[in-house]
Image (cartoon, rainbow, N blue to C red):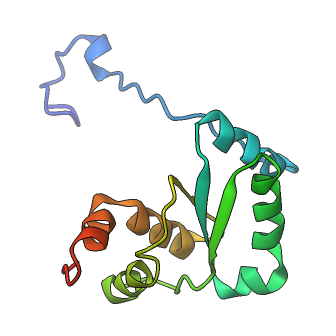
Amino acid sequence: MDSFGWGGNAPEQERIIRWQAPPLKFGVGATREIGHELRKAGIRSVLLVTDPVLAGLGLPARVAKQIEQEGISVALFDRARVEPTDESCAEAARELESLQVDGYVGLGGGSSMDTAKMLSTPVALRYRRWSGAVF
């Protein structure tokens, strides 16, 4: 039996797995295009989520400027914690509950990305509508 459990007799096309990833940009200068890409996606306002270290280095301010140059408003949350927990994310959601944005940008490492993803989930939206929700 092969690794897919097909007994080794499956037609070749059934062994091919296709994955179509969304477009990915990287490299020197790629950040300069973030505002354009957000505007192209129809985004009018974003929450830029990052950590205190990057905030201290000024990177979020530079990224926010790139976004704002495309006419998109930016709110900054610069207190993403290392290895975010449900409690730290719930605290962030409570703090930001009155904020109305239609996009999220995670800037930095995995912790900032994870916090941005959590804040953009339906769980966060339910929390905003019903105070006292449990994550």
Foreground pick, 20 / 5: 20
Q: Is residue 135 left or right of residue 34?
A: left
Residue shown at 41%/61% (left/top)?
120
Q: Is residue 35 above or below residue 113?
A: above
78 and 46: which is toward the camera: 46
The percent position of residue 113, horizontal first and vertical second, equals 53, 66
Q: Quadrant of residue 18?
A: top left
Q: Quadrant of residue 13?
A: top left
Q: Quadrant of the N terminus?
A: top left
> Height in image: 122 above or below 134?
above
Q: How many marks?
A: 0
Q: Residue at x 59, y 58 (%)?
A: 46
Residue 89 relative to residue 70: left or right: left
Q: What is the x, y in percent for residue 97?
A: 40, 75
Q: x%, y% of residue 7?
A: 12, 25
Give the quadrant of the C terminus: bottom left
Q: Is residue 90 above or below residue 99?
A: below
Where is 79 relative to 31, above or below?
Answer: below
Q: Is residue 72 left or right of residue 101?
A: right
Residue farthest right in this picture: 29
Residue 8, how many percent across, how many down? Answer: 18, 22
Taking the spot 49% from the left edge, 70% from the top edge, the residue there is 99
Instruction: Residue 43: name its quadrant.
Output: top right
Pick the residue in front: 66 or 45.
45
